[in-house]
Amino acid sequence: MDNVATHGTTAGHGHAAGSQGHAHEHHELAFWEKYIFSQDHKVIGIQYAVTGLLFLLFGFTLMMIMRWQLAYPGRPIPLIGGMFGPDKAPGGIMLPEFYNMLGAMHGTIMVFMGVVPLAVGGFGNFVMPLQIGAPDMAFPNST
């Protein structure tokens, strides 16, 4: 004879015989547990993707400032020209050294903080566990 469901549990749900249906209550995770300290590979992949897209937007902004200089040389940068200071853009007019700085920052941010995290972190964490049949992240649990 089997020992299945002989210790005060029902065969269908595995509840104790005296429980009144409260075992189905689920604990809702707090925002911090669900999104900041998540162990779900899909959430982690989305976090990488969103962060990578934000850095791509920042790199795009740097590129647009450089394009302003190419389109209108010697004219002040509108709206944000005064924010760069007199050593980089006196009177809002971009100096050549500042243009070179923007070019280096644009390239570095786009590649190392935008494209690589988006491709490796976002795509890799979201899709790769699904492709190999892994239930979750490789080694996240400390419990």
Image (cartoon, grey):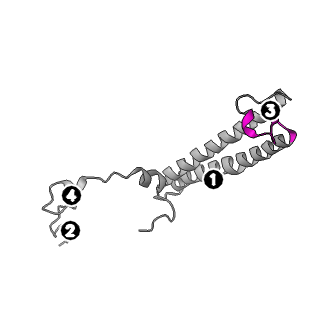
Give amino acid for label 1.
Answer: Val
31 left or right of 128 in image: left
Select label 4 or label 3 by which is in front.
3
- Residue 4 circle label: 2
Select label 2 or label 1 by which is in front.
1
Work out how far the residue at label 4 is from the one at label 3, CA to CA, in angstroms. 77 Å
Q: Is residue 84 magenta?
A: yes
106 left or right of 97 in image: left
Where is residue 130? Give x, y as percent.
51, 53
Q: Which residue is mark 3?
A: 91
Give amino acid for label 3.
Answer: Gly
Select label 1 or label 4 by which is in front.
1
Looking at the image, tell me whether mark 4 or mark 2 is earlier in sequence order: 2
Which of the pair 125/2 is nearer the observer? 125
Looking at the image, tell me whether mark 4 or mark 3 is earlier in sequence order: 4
Give amino acid for label 4.
Answer: Gly
What stretch of residues is rendered in magenta? 81-96
Rendered-image quadrant of the C terminus:
bottom left
Work out how far the residue at label 1 is from the one at label 4, CA to CA, in angstroms. 43 Å
Tell me if label 4 and label 2 are in contact, CB under 8 Å: no
115 left or right of 99 in image: left
Looking at the image, tell me whether mark 2 or mark 1 is earlier in sequence order: 2
Q: Which residue is mark 1?
A: 120
Q: Secondary structure at mark 3?
A: helix
Q: Which residue is mark 4?
A: 12
